[in-house]
Amino acid sequence: MKMVPAKDKIPLIIDNKYHLQNYFNYQHTLLDSFTRIRTMELVEKPDSLSAALAYQEMRLRLPFKIAGLNTDSGGENGKDFKEQLARDEIVHFYSRTSTPTDNPRVERSHLTDEKEFYNRSLNGQTFKKQKEALKNWEHTYNFLRPHQALGYLTPMKFYEFWKENPEKAFQIKNKYQAYLAKQRQRLANSRRIKNKEQIEKLMQFIDAKLNQNQLQKVTLQPYKLELIKCQLCSWT
């Protein structure tokens, strides 16, 4: 669920404290991990009943049936929402607490929403305008916007391609997964190099500190400057 600031709402003030949940609308998202096809609904309340009603609308716009859903453990994904999934015989998986990487595709799609949709014109607009515009954005996302992970096809084009030639569709996905694996390895190597450099700089500072009394000419300032961005230590 993504929180969306709303122009026609104001925060509640109770006991001189702001309660910001009344200041937002809430976007629910259904995203298929394979095709990246997704549907979205905007609701006014962050409760499980609103989530269940949004889910019933979103599933109708998917071109296939849902077998299982992965959500976080927020309150909106319990009670009415959970009961609705049970009635539909859908397996409900939960991400680990405070672990958005358990559902990375949805989280990444919300970043795309922020950069390419809300920040451009609709952040802070009324619920009605946001809801109407979100439907148009859903169409753009599924039918017009190319995705690197899909070989620069749109989600709907990739879905049609998969139905015609599943083997080649999987080749596209596997190629992107191989690319991600290389990127992760490069990042890991970069971090190891950076940590090694920081350790060396920290040791240089320690050596200078130990030798300061013996060699009055030794100054610590150059070493401190080297450690300003060091993640292994901090200075006050």
Image (cartoon, rainbow, N blue to C red):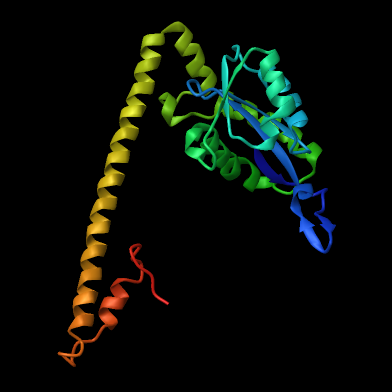
Q: Is residue 54 visible?
A: no
Q: Residue at x 35, y 71 (%)?
A: 228
Image quadrant in which the C terminus is located: bottom left
**Residue located farthest toward the left when viewing the structure as drawn:** 214
What's the residue at 36%, 13% (across, down)?
A: 168
Could you say which quadrant of the image residue 3 lies in? top right
Between 89 and 108, the one lying in front of the other is 89
Residue 84 coordinates in the image, percent (x, y):
71, 19
Which image quarter: residue 30? Answer: top right
Q: Which residue is farthest bottom?
A: 216
Outermost residue toward the top in this view: 164
The image shows residue 226, relative to residue 213, as above or below, that is above
Residue 116: image x %, image y %? Answer: 58, 41
Residue 39: x and y in percent read: 64, 25
Residue drawn at point x = 34 percent, y = 17 percent: 171
Q: Position of residue 213 (x, y in %)?
A: 20, 90
